[in-house]
């Protein structure tokens, strides 16, 4: 169960990274064009992947936390602190930024502002996510 969740979480990373890059490029490239259905759809797919990753992450976190024998070690151990504190908090911040970025499309502002604001929020989220993925300890694909 946990392995399956970790594999799903691992794979969703790539979908989020690809969708972030595509959303950023598309919004920046189309700043002077109308905020159209394609921009909404791309944001929606990003949102679904980000929220799915959040739910899977929360479930894994709760399961791992409940099976951890000594929780007093979490803050003093670098690996445990990364897994239980730094990674989740940073990623939740990134997912909040993605959610706000997607929400911009519904605001009563010009299309230029919609493109710019969502692209900038997605860009900050991308930087946080790239920085906080456990590249050194995770495989690039499940099973590798
Ligand atoms: C811990 C669980 C979750 C939380 C706290 C959460 C939170 C939120 C929040 C705050 C919004 C923004 C609402 C708005 O301002 O319009 C939202 C929208 C959305 N969520 Fe989640 N969500 C969760 C799980 C999921 C899951 C599992 C999915 C799908 C796989 C999902 C898909 C979406 C989509 C597609 C939207 C955008 C709707 C739209 O703008 O049209 N969420 N969610
Ligand atoms: C954009 C959001 C996120 C991305 C891209 C991401 C990415 C990753 C990656 C690549 C791994 C390693 C997977 C592996 O070893 O196969 C991982 C592990 C993990 N993530 Fe996330 N994550 C995100 C959000 C979250 C959130 C919001 C939580 C919790 C609330 C979370 C909790 C965890 C946990 C508990 C692990 C397992 C660590 C371990 O076993 O060492 N993640 N994450």
Image (tube, helix red, strand yellow):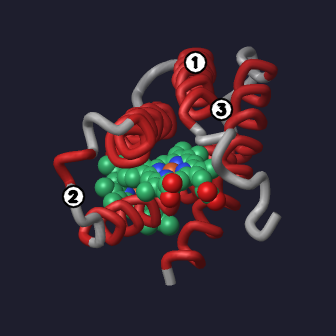
Q: Considering depth in this image, is 10 or 52 the residue closer to the camera?
A: 10
Q: Which of marks 2 and 1 is nearer the N terminus?
A: 2
Q: Considering depth in this image, is 57 or 51 the residue closer to the camera?
A: 57
Residue 105: x %, y % from top left: 51, 35
Q: Which residue is drawn at 41% across and 31% down?
A: 107
Residue 30: x %, y % from top left: 77, 23
Query: Quarter of the image holding residue 31?
Result: top right
The Cα–Cα distance between marks 3 and 2, rounded to whole angstroms, is 51 Å
Q: Name the residue under label 1.
A: 120
Residue 76: x %, y % from top left: 28, 34
- In the image, taking residue 130 as reference, residue 106 lies left or right, namely left
> Helix, strand or loop at disc 1?
helix
Query: Crowding near pointer 1: few (<14 within 10 Å), some, many (20+)?
Result: some
Query: Quarter of the image holding residue 116?
Result: top right
Q: Considering depth in this image, is 59 or 107 the residue closer to the camera?
A: 59
> Helix, strand or loop at disc 3?
loop
Determine the residue located farthest toward the bottom in the rendered image. Answer: 1
Q: Name the residue under label 2.
A: 70
Q: Which of marks 3 and 2 is nearer the N terminus?
A: 3
């Amino acid at each position: 169960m946990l392995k399956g969740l970790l594999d799903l979480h691992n794979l969703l990373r790539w979908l989020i990274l690809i969708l972030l890059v595509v959303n950023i490029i598309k919004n920046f490239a189309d700043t002077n064009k109308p905020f159209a259905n394609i921009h909404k759809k791309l944001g929606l797919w990003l949102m679904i992947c980000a929220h799915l990753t959040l739910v899977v992450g929360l479930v894994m976190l709760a399961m791992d936390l409940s099976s951890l024998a000594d929780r007093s070690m979490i803050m003093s151990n670098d690996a445990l602190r990364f897994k239980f504190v730094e990674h989740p908090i940073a990623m939740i911040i990134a997912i909040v930024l993605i959610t706000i970025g997607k929400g911009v499309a519904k605001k009563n502002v010009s299309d230029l502002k919609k493109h710019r604001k969502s692209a900038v929020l997605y860009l900050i989220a991308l930087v946080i996510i790239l920085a906080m993925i456990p590249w050194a300890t995770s495989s690039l694909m499940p099973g590798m």
